């Protein structure tokens, strides 16, 4: 029985529990096979266009996400824990081989548990205190933040 | 907006300051009462308070001879807004994940 490895801070962290009617094996594949992860990792209109996963602690976890207006976010992180079909932990605060990256803003984990009908999985994202909002903004998930306003102004100027 | 959010996060990055914010969430309090639970010299505590004021999280007013602190929820709302955006990202992400794995399962079962 894996336990989420974080000390949870409700001010900065997120926890999402989901139950899905497929065996843990398939959920695990979706999290650990690059060609599958690319299909779900980024909400539309953004796309994950490249992904590298070296499935071992210290291994590379890289995603390249591209936005509808040519934005590109290339993030290389590091896997911290890999328990087959049970637990995956990765961070962008360290590079491959645990080398400090100097930036980074998130450590995320997913914990899988088999249920009678499928899989209960818990995703946790724990964030740095001073949230690296630049990354967050580039990603275009700003709900009413400055960047959205900048884009609006740019569009308005082009009218 | 962004510089303000940075200041807010910096202000909240310290356990003493978080405890002050929590105390003020229960209602306004005097500086003296706020400082009581902390084992630190008053000047150190006032420094924490100043950071909280600079971040816009806390407002202090002098009423008579007492300085009273009040929480400004707008600044906290900005932090919550950021977290909501992250939550929204992960929710959409996991919706897509669920669809994908259900699809994988169907393909496994459906291939004769």
Image (tube, rainbow, N blue to C red):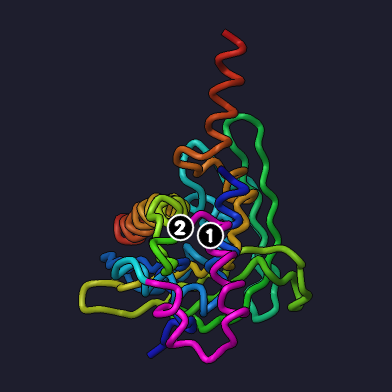
Q: Quadrant of the N terminus of chain A?
A: bottom left
Image coordinates of residue B13 in percent, x first then y, are 57, 71
Marks 1/2 in contact by CB < 8 Å: the verdict is yes
The chain to which mark 1 is attached is B
Provide the major secondary structure of the magenta segment: helix
Q: Is residue B77 above or below residue A128?
A: above
Q: 10 Å neighbourhood of mark 2: few (<14), some, or many (≥20)?
A: some
Q: Residue at x 47, y 81 (%)?
A: B35
Q: Is residue A6 in view?
A: yes
Q: How many marks?
A: 2
Give the mark nearest the N terminus, 1 or 2. 1
Write down the quadrant of residue A13 in the picture.
bottom left
Q: Is residue B112 in view?
A: no
Q: 10 Å neighbourhood of mark 1: few (<14), some, or many (≥20)?
A: some
Q: Residue at x 51, y 70 (%)?
A: A126
Mark drawn on residue A79: none
Between A14 and A88, the residue placed more toward the observer is A14
Which residue sits furthest front?
A: B64
Q: Residue at x 46, y 37 (%)?
A: A144
SS at mark 1 in the image = helix
Which residue sits furthest top?
A: A159
Q: Which residues are magenta?
A: B30-58
Q: CA distance from mark 1 to mark 2?
A: 6 Å
Mark drawn on residue B53: 1
Q: Which residue position is annotated with label 2?
A: B59
Q: Is residue A52 above or below residue B1?
A: below
Write down the quadrant of residue B65 in the picture.
bottom left
Q: Residue at x 46, y 56 (%)?
A: B79
Image coordinates of residue A20 in percent, x first then y, are 28, 65
Q: Is residue B46 left or right of residue A102?
A: left
């Amino acid at each position: 029985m894996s336990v989420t490895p974080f000390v949870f801070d409700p001010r900065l962290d997120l926890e999402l529990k989901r139950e899905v009617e497929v065996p843990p094996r398939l959920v695990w594949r979706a999290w650990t096979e690059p060609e599958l992860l690319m299909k779900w990792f980024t909400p539309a209109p953004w796309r994950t266009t490249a992904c590298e996963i070296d499935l071992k602690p210290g291994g590379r976890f890289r995603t390249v996400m591209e936005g509808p207006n040519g934005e590109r976010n290339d993030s290389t992180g590091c896997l911290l824990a890999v328990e087959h079909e049970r637990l995956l932990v990765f961070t962008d605060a360290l590079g491959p081989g645990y080398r400090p990256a100097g930036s980074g803003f998130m450590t995320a984990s997913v914990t899988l548990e088999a249920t009678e009908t499928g899989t209960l999985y818990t995703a946790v994202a724990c964030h740095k205190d001073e949230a690296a909002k630049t990354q967050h903004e580039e990603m275009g998930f700003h709900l009413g933040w400055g960047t959205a306003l900048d884009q609006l102004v740019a569009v308005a100027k082009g009218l | 907006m962004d510089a303000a959010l940075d200041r807010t996060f910096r202000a909240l990055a310290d356990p003493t300051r978080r405890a002050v914010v929590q105390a003020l969430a229960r209602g306004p309090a005097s500086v003296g009462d706020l400082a009581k639970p902390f084992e630190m010299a008053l000047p150190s505590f006032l420094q924490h308070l100043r950071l909280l004021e600079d971040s816009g999280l806390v407002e202090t007013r002098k009423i008579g001879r007492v300085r009273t602190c009040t929480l400004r929820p707008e600044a906290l709302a900005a932090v919550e807004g950021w977290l909501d955006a992250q939550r929204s990202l992960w929710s959409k992400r996991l919706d897509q994940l669920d669809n994908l794995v259900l699809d994988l399962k169907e393909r496994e079962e459906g291939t004769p």
